[in-house]
Structure formats: structure tokens, C-alpha cells
Amino acid sequence: MSRTVTTLTAQALAERLGGRLEHCPPERVISEVKPLEEAGAASVSFLANPRYVGKAKESPAGLILVDAVVDLADRPVLRVKHPYWSFAQAIRWLHPEPVAEWSDTPVHPTAVLGEGSRVFPGATVGARTLLGRECVLHPGVHIGDDCVLGDGCELFAGVVLYRRTRLGNRVTVHANSVVGSDGYGYVLIEGRHDKIPQVGWVEVGDDVEIGACTSIDRGVLGPTRIGAGTKIDNQVQVGHNVKVGQHCLLVSQTGISGSTRLGDFVTLAGKVGVVGHIEIGSRSVVGGNSVVAKSLPEGSFVTGYPARPHRQWTEAQAALNRLPAFMKQLRKG
Amino acid sequence: MSRTVTTLTAQALAERLGGRLEHCPPERVISEVKPLEEAGAASVSFLANPRYVGKAKESPAGLILVDAVVDLADRPVLRVKHPYWSFAQAIRWLHPEPVAEWSDTPVHPTAVLGEGSRVFPGATVGARTLLGRECVLHPGVHIGDDCVLGDGCELFAGVVLYRRTRLGNRVTVHANSVVGSDGYGYVLIEGRHDKIPQVGWVEVGDDVEIGACTSIDRGVLGPTRIGAGTKIDNQVQVGHNVKVGQHCLLVSQTGISGSTRLGDFVTLAGKVGVVGHIEIGSRSVVGGNSVVAKSLPEGSFVTGYPARPHRQWTEAQAALNRLPAFMKQLRKG
Amino acid sequence: MSRTVTTLTAQALAERLGGRLEHCPPERVISEVKPLEEAGAASVSFLANPRYVGKAKESPAGLILVDAVVDLADRPVLRVKHPYWSFAQAIRWLHPEPVAEWSDTPVHPTAVLGEGSRVFPGATVGARTLLGRECVLHPGVHIGDDCVLGDGCELFAGVVLYRRTRLGNRVTVHANSVVGSDGYGYVLIEGRHDKIPQVGWVEVGDDVEIGACTSIDRGVLGPTRIGAGTKIDNQVQVGHNVKVGQHCLLVSQTGISGSTRLGDFVTLAGKVGVVGHIEIGSRSVVGGNSVVAKSLPEGSFVTGYPARPHRQWTEAQAALNRLPAFMKQLRKG
């Protein structure tokens, strides 16, 4: 992977962001942006939601961006006006997104194609991308820089893989689907939505099949993951940082919001919506057109909006149909 | 149409699948896989759902894949452990999907373009594909092998037609739509989802218009059909084996699950979902964001989830809004 | 902009449409089709819905297509059997859509690229299209004729801009999205849906970001507009003539029907549907999976189908869950 390694001292970060260091030596070297739970001694992280003060106190992050009032005891902090926006800025400086490398040829000279792999006319392959054996890239497939594909992958016409996408073996992606697009992340600052840079990637396991016109966003800083054996239908949307387990079924027009986790063998029927930052336990089934707004334990079977136990939902709908007559009757009685 | 004709004897099928023949001469030649209702003397079919025993007894299929216990009297059966999975295997053997033919040129040398048809730079046309007169393929259109387009078709940039797609005359397809992608069909076997090969095609009638970013899956073994004069909006999903009648309106973000049939002049408003294997009668109207879970007679007007007569739904929603106050009042009274 | 200027006299229109002129000199020159509220002395407009008689009477349109019975006092009218269909015909004659210009090269010789702009292999640019400075067109981007892009735009692989699309500065469009496709407009005439020609365009303001697999239809005659600073997620659908204000957030799988207007800082959460021809006031928030069926004042916060005040919706859903037990209890009591 070709990444420009960039570092900044805590002092430099403080100056750029107009903030004040506490409990942190100014010469500390910061080389990466990480969420609190993954941060290390050279990481800068942030705390915007007071709910996570406990997590922040336990984090070994080398520096934590906080506002003027939050109390993190002796943790090394950088006090700034807008911690979340400052986090976005830090991503820009420490994880600059490289521009796509120019190529005069459809397949970049540094790309490597495994034995038996075929790239049809009109398809393009980016710099340093590695294809396994017996892959087929149909016309109009566009693969970015620094991708890795296993053996036996077939990408139908018009599929786009953004840079750094990783596909396992025998992955099939149907026409005009997109893997690795930027997630939807903005911070409102001075009356405009400023982008949280999306510099992560997508990892797709072995034997995954992805339908047509589906989009899977890359993570903000790390991976969005689709587990081995999972089958995704057409027009499905998977948000940034989502982790889908193995052997799941995501039926057409379903959408999963950012950072949500699905266990294994989860079935989301057609047009399901799942909010962000929740967990759906393994072997759960969500009925069509439902909206899951809270985490679900293993083996759940839910339907409706908000999703509730399937039987409760069917009984409620039956009662709802009788409700107008019921109300009229009671008023008379 | 270039299809490799492959046949197997009943005995060979039995050996490959590890099954036992009953009421079937081992030397019987099987040349195709067909559903029970379309099967003939050289067809192998399958029965996985006991509900269809009657249909299976009446089928003239040359061989029917069944489990160890089902009783089909004297019909020729092959008893196997997993009839549905065995059916998938039989498709693989009897209907092998040919690989896309290589071409050094954007238009394959065996493709034929009618008078006045234009293929823009960046578009590709597959082997043996026939275009009628005055067709326009915008840049980045990719048409697979063995397709047939009538006269006056216009495909906007990025449209993908999978192999064997058939378009009538004056069909318009807007940018980045996909016609003929694989349907969503899997069978759970030994803890993984194994693919039911999708080897059918899509037939689109005259004067059909298809919006942008729409996907229409091909049938499993036969056609998915869109009737003449039907207009499909953007981001619509049509599942495998669906039959849409003539002059229907399918509004944006609607999804129709596999094997469902629509009559003529049916209107599905925006974001409608229709479950699989049902029928919606002609001149029916389904309100926006509804889910149709049961067949509907001609001239229905339904809304909601599950869809119910429109007036019933509006009355129920009005009653629902009054319900909290109503409950409180009753508790007090 | 290269437009063939075409004019017709009122008399010629009457003859072509088989109609009768009233209060209109036959030699009046008609050069454009316009809605009532935008029409001028050289415009032909139409009145199909009796609700708009007042608007028609006030319109300075040079000619108004009406049916046999409507009374517009002394306004110049052309009485025809099918005013709406006649309107569609008039668009065909007065605003004929030019065919896409042929190019032997990926970038049309008349296109102009600003300094530092890069067009990757496999991308195409249409006739007379102007790109600002430092734009990036990734592989497989297809831009139609007569488009204008500002500085610093980045279009990811497979993006399609239809002719006449206008992008401001620093607009980002993610892979396989479509801007400028035809809106969904038909008129039922003699048992078939005849197309209302869609000859407008799309205008996108500065600093707009558009996700992957999203589609934005052009206006019928004029613009569809996306205001500066608005951020659109993946798989969003925006219908013809929609006007989205500045700094709005349109989350994934949301759909907005034709001619609807959004103020500034409006948030539509995931999978929201908005019907056509309504207004959503600035700073409104619509909860996920809701359907907005009526105009909303500024600062609304609504959820459900039909959308209602958020708190009313949550209370109604809570009551609905208790309803079956409540009914049972009342029956017993």
C-alpha cells in the first residue's frame, strides 16, 4: 500500500487548530487519527459526545480533542472550539487522500493480473492493484489504485471499486454496483456542512455475491466489512464502517446506516432500513420494509416501523384495521 | 442463439447427485431443467414444497427430484437428500452459462448493426448481438452476447444489458440502468448459501421506457417480461421471472419480488414493495410506500403495509392519530 | 448553448393539433412552451386542471391550450380535445431535443478543459462542454453536450451527466450517479402512455456532494435545482423540476417527487419519500422512512406515513403496540 506517512507534533496540531494542550508534552509525535477505542500512543482521537467520557478516560490515545469544559482528569487533551470538526481537519493533515494515479493505458503498468485473468475492452485497472487468477473484468469495470482481488472474481460491466478495496476469492459483483465510495459524514460548522474525510476502505470476504446497482461505502478511517458467504441483492446500500457477518442475506433496496454490526446468518428482507451504531444478533430475521432502530438479540424475528416482534406487529396491524369501527362503537355504547 | 446442448441420462443424474431412481428408466435422456408446470418428457423438475404434490403428480416431467418421503405414486422420481439444491446442480450441468466472448474491438465482429444505428466511443456490443435500425448506444453502454434490439432503441450512457436480453422497438433505457442481471436465488446447504444458477433472460416490449439506475433481473430458466408500453421510473427493482403487463407505471424506488405477475395498466406509486409469487390484477393502483403481500383482484386501490383498501388505510391512520388520547380518556372514564 | 430556434404561428399550432383559436390572432408567433406562471407573449401554455382557472386568467401567455368547455373570458385560447397531450406535442415541435453530437475522440473537439483538469482514459466529454480548472473526470465518466462545470469538480467513475447539466465549483459526484436524466412524465392518450418530452436541465450549486448510484432528473422545460452546500447520499432520487435549497441533507434511499421545493437546511433522513408539488420549509427534519404528503412549515419535525409531528407519531406507535390487549380487555370488562 502506498501511503504518504505524515506526522505532526501535538504542538503543531494545537497551533493549526487554535487550541490549548493539557497534560501533553508539546513535542509528542502524532501520526494517525483513530477512534477512542482503537487509539494508541501516537494517535489523536476526539470526544464530542459527553456520553463517552468514560471511554475517553480509559483510552491510551496520545491526544484527545475536547471542548473547553469536559473533564478528562490527567488525560492528554487538546482543548478546541469544535472537537469533531478539528477531528476532520486532523484526518486531512494526517491521512491525506492521494490523487488517483494517471495512466495512459487501461491497465496501469504497475497493476498485476494473475494467470487467466481477463480485462475486457473499456475496463480500467489502477496503480499497484493486484488481481488473482481467473478473474473477469467485463467492459466498463473501473478498479482504483491499491486494490486487491482474490482468485476467480467476476465483476460485471460498469462495476466501480474505489481505491484500496479488497475482495476475497470468488467474489461476484453485478453491473453498475459501487464498492468503496465515500461514506456520508459531515459536521455543521459556521453554517455549512464540512466533510469528514472518508479515507478507509472496504473488505469483502470469500464467496460474497453483490447484486446490481448496489453501493457499499468505505469506512471513515478503517474498513467496512462484508463477511464471507454473504449475499447482497440489487440496490442495497451499506454505510461506512458497517460490519456485516458471514452468510447474511441482504435483500433488495435494503439500507444499513453507518457503524452498525450484523452477526452471522442475518436476513434483512426487502426495503429494510437499519439505523446506525446498533447490533443485530446472529440468525435474526427482519421482515420486509421494516426499520430497525435498536439493537436486536440473536435469533430475533421483527417487523414494522419501529421494528417489533413479528407477531406483535401482525396483531397490531389487525387491531388497527378494526380500530375505526371499534372507536365508533364505543362512542355509541 | 448459441447454446451448448448438453444432455444427461437419468442414471447419470442419479449418480452425480447420489440419488435413487424410481419409476424411471435409467437410460432416459434429460436435456433441460424446467419448473413443474412447464416440464416435458425430457425435463428434470423438482418438488421441494409439499404444497405442490398435486401439481407434481400432473406434471409430464421426465424426472422429478424429490426427497426421501414424498409420495408421487408412479411418477418418475429421483430421490435425493436436497431436491432444491439438486435442482441447482442440474441447472449447472444442463444449462452451463457460456463465458462472455472475447473481443479486441468495441463491437464484436459477429454483431450486426441495423442501418443508421450509432455506437458511441466507449460503448461495447457483444458477440452475435443484433441491433435494429436507428438505434443509439451512448458512450459506456455495454451490451452482452446474443442480445436482440429492435428499431429505434436508445440506450443512454452506462446502460448494461446482460447476455440474451431482448428489447422491442423504440425502447429507451436511461443512464446506468441494468437489464438482465442475475436474480437473487440461493439454497442453504451445509451452512452456506449456494447459488441457484440464473440462466434465463429479459424480454422488453415495444415502446417501453426505463429510467436511470433501475435493475431488472433475468429469469432463473426463462424470461422476465416487461409488457409493451410500460413505463418504469428511476431506481426501480424488478426481480427474476416477474411478468409485468402492458402500459403499467412503475414509479421510482419501487421493488417487485420474484415471479410476481402484474396485469395491464397497473400503477405502482413510488417506493412500493411487492412480495414474490403473487398476482396484481389489471388497472390496480397501489399507493406510495405500500407493501403488497397478497394477490389483488382487478381494479384494486390499496395502500399501507400490509396493503389494504385505500379508504380503510386512511381511516385507520386517522383513528391511530386519535388513539393515545382515546385510551387515556377511557382509562379515566 | 446551441438550440435550434423554432417558431410556429398560432394558426399553425391550431392546424397541427386540430383545435380552434379564440381571442387570438392566427398570425401570432409562438416560440416556446411555458407553464402558466412563467409564460409570456410568445409562449403557449396549457390548462388541464380546472383548479388553475384563476392562474390561467392572470397569465400573460400568448396562447393557452384548453378543452372545449373551460371559460377563460377573453384570454387567447386554443381549444383542443386533450390539452395536456397537446402541450406535449407543442414541446416536441418548439423544443426539439437535439441528437447527441458524434465524436471520434473521447473528448469532443469543441469541448474546453480548464487548466489542470484531467480526463482519465475511458471518460468522454460532449460537444461544447466547458470544464473549469482542476476538474477530475475518472474513467468511465460520460458528460453530454453543452454542459458547464465549475472549478475543482471531481466526478468518480461511471458518473453520467446528461446534456446541459450545470455544476458549480467544487462539486463532487460519486460513482455511477446520474444527473440530468429524463423525468417521469406521461399522458394517457388512446390507451397508451405518451411521453411528455423532458427538455430541461439540472443546476447544481457550489460545494454540493452527491453520493453513489443517485439519480437527479432534469426539469420538463426548465431547471431542477440543487442549492449550494447541499449533501446528497447514495441511491437518492430527485424528480423533475424539484428545487432543493442550500445546505440540505438528503440521506440514502430518499426520493423526492416532481416539482417539490425544499427550503434551506432541510434534513430528510434515510428512505424518506416526498410527494410532488409541495413545499418543505427551511430547517425541517423528516424522520427516516417517512412519507411527506403535505407541505410543511419551517422548522417542522415529522415522522411516519403520512408524516405527522414526531411526538404524535411515537405516541401513536406506542399506543398501537398496546392496542390488541386494550381491545381484549375492553371486550371482557
Image: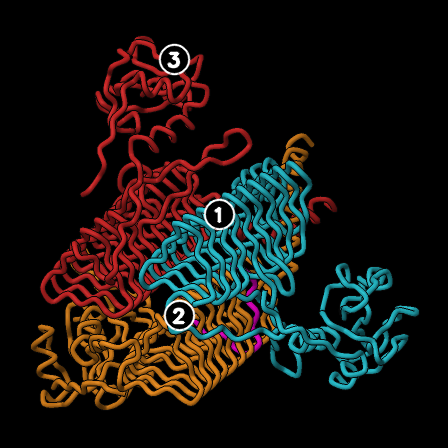
Chain colours: A red, B orange, C cyan
Q: Over which residues does the magenta segment extend?
A: B254-273
- The disc labelled 1 sits on which kind of residue? Ile
Q: Pointer 3 and pointer 1: residues touching (CB < 8 Å)?
A: no
Residue C73: mark: none
Q: In the rendered view of the protein, which quadrant contains the N terminus of chain A?
A: top left
- Magenta-highlighted stretch: main secondary structure? loop
Is A265 situated left or right of C45 in this image? left
Front residue (pair C189, B272): C189
Front residue (pair C137, B301): C137
x and y percentages locating residue A284 in the rendered image = 32, 47
x and y percentages locating residue A274 in the rendered image = 41, 45
Asked which secondary structure carries label 2, the reply is loop
For mark 1, name the chain: C
x and y percentages locating residue A91 in the rendered image = 33, 32
- What separation in Å lies between label 2 and label 1 (alpha carbons)? 25 Å
Residue A20: mark: 3
Residue position for label 2: B139
C177 to C84, vertically: above or below: above
Residue C232: mark: 1
- What separation in Å lies between label 3 and label 2 (alpha carbons)? 54 Å
C85 to C250, vertically: above or below: below
Front residue (pair C184, C76): C76
For mark 3, name the chain: A
Any magenta on residue B57?
Answer: no
Asked which secondary structure carries label 1, the reply is strand
Asked which secondary structure carries label 3, the reply is strand
